[in-house]
Image: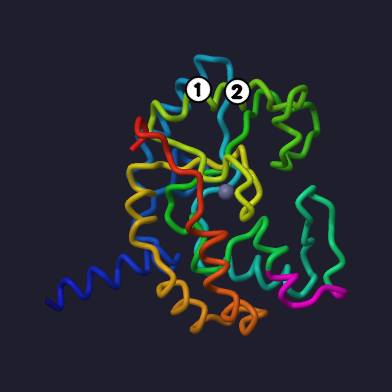
Amino acid sequence: MSLIIKSLGKLKDTLTGRSRDHVIQFENTHAVIHRDVESPLKNLKQKAREAGFDLAIASSFRDYNSQLNIWNLKSLGKRPVLDSAGNPLSVPSMKPEELVFAILRWSALPGCSRHHWGTEIDVFDRNSLPKDYQVQLIPKEAAPGGIFARFNDWLDTNISGEGFFRPYSKDKGGVSPEWWHLSYAPVSQRYFEQFDLSLCQNVIKDSAIELKDTVLQCLPDIYSRFISNISLPDTRSV
Ligand SMILES: [Zn+2]
C-alpha cells in the first residue's frame, strides 16, 4: 500500500515538474529529455539528416521553478506578453483575468506544462538558418516562403513514424498553434491521461505564483481550454 502511495506521489512529481528522475541529457547537448525519448529522437534526427536537415532542439524539459519564473516575469511585465499575432501587449493596462489568458496563449501554468514531462521538444532546422538569424519560433517562420517552410513540411510527414505528434497543431481557442512543438506520444499520452484538474488545483494552491487568486478562480476554464483540449496523435504514433 505505502509503495503504491509512494509511486503515485512520484508520478505526480514527474507530471508537475518537481522531479528530474525521469530525464537525461541528450547527446552532449543542452537538451534534457525523458529517457524513453532518447532513441526515437536519435532516429528522427538521423532521418532529418538524410533529408538534408539538421534537427536542433530549442527547448526541452523545463522544471516547475523555471516555468514559475517565466510566468511570474510575464505577470509582472518584466518579460513581454504577446497577443495571438506575436505583438507585445501593455501589461499594466490589463485586467488580471485578461492578463492570465493572454499569458496562457504562449506559456503554460507552472506545474501544468507538458515540458515538465520530458516528452516535449521545440525544434528547428539549423541548416536553414540565414547568417546571424535569431530563431524566434513563430508561425511565419514555417509559413510558405518562411525559412522553415520546407522543414515544417518534412516534419508533417515524418514525425509520426517515430512516435511524435503535434499537440498544438491547430488553434482550438487555447494555446496558439506551435508547429515547432513535438511530443513523444507513447509516453506523453500516458502522462496526459494521468493529469487532471485536481492535480492542477493542488499545484497552484501550493505555488508562489503571481495572479494566484485569478488563476484559481478560472482554473476549470483554463484546464478545459489550455490543458485538456490538445490535438491528439493519430493512431500510428501511439
Ligand atoms: Zn514547446
Badge 1: few (under 14), some or many (20 or more) residues near its Cα, within 10 Å?
few
Indicate yes or no whether the magenta region holds residue 99: yes
Q: How many marks?
A: 2
Q: Is residue 62 left or right of residue 21?
A: right
Q: Is residue 90 left or right of residue 214?
A: right
Boundaries of the magenta span: 92-100
The picture places residue 213, in percent across and down from the top left corner, at 62, 84
Above or below, comparing residue 60 to residue 15 in the picture: above
- The colouring scheme, among rainbow, by chain, secondary structure or one colour, is rainbow
The picture places residue 169, in percent across and down from the top left corner, at 57, 40
Question: Disc 2 vs disc 1: Cβ atoms closer than 8 Å?
Answer: yes
> Residue 57 appears in which quarter of the rendering?
top right
Indicate yes or no whether the magenta region holds residue 128: no
Of 193 and 182, nearer the camera is 193
The picture places residue 155, in percent across and down from the top left corner, at 54, 27
State the residue at coordinates (76%, 35%). Answer: 140
State the residue at coordinates (74%, 33%). Answer: 141
Tag 2: residue type? Asp
> Residue 195 appears in which quarter of the rendering?
bottom left
Badge 2: few (under 14), some or many (20 or more) residues near its Cα, within 10 Å?
few
Spatial separation of the CA atoms under disc 2 and disc 1: 7 Å
Q: What SS does tag 2 mark?
A: helix
Tag shown at residue 153: 2
What secondary structure is the stretch in magenta mostly built from? helix
Name the residue at the left extreme: 1
Tag 1: residue type? Thr
> Which residue in the protein does label 1 denote?
157
The picture places residue 207, in percent across and down from the top left corner, at 53, 80
Q: What SS does tag 1 mark?
A: helix
State the residue at coordinates (69%, 41%). Answer: 137
Tag shown at residue 110: none
Q: Is residue 205 left or right of residue 95?
A: left
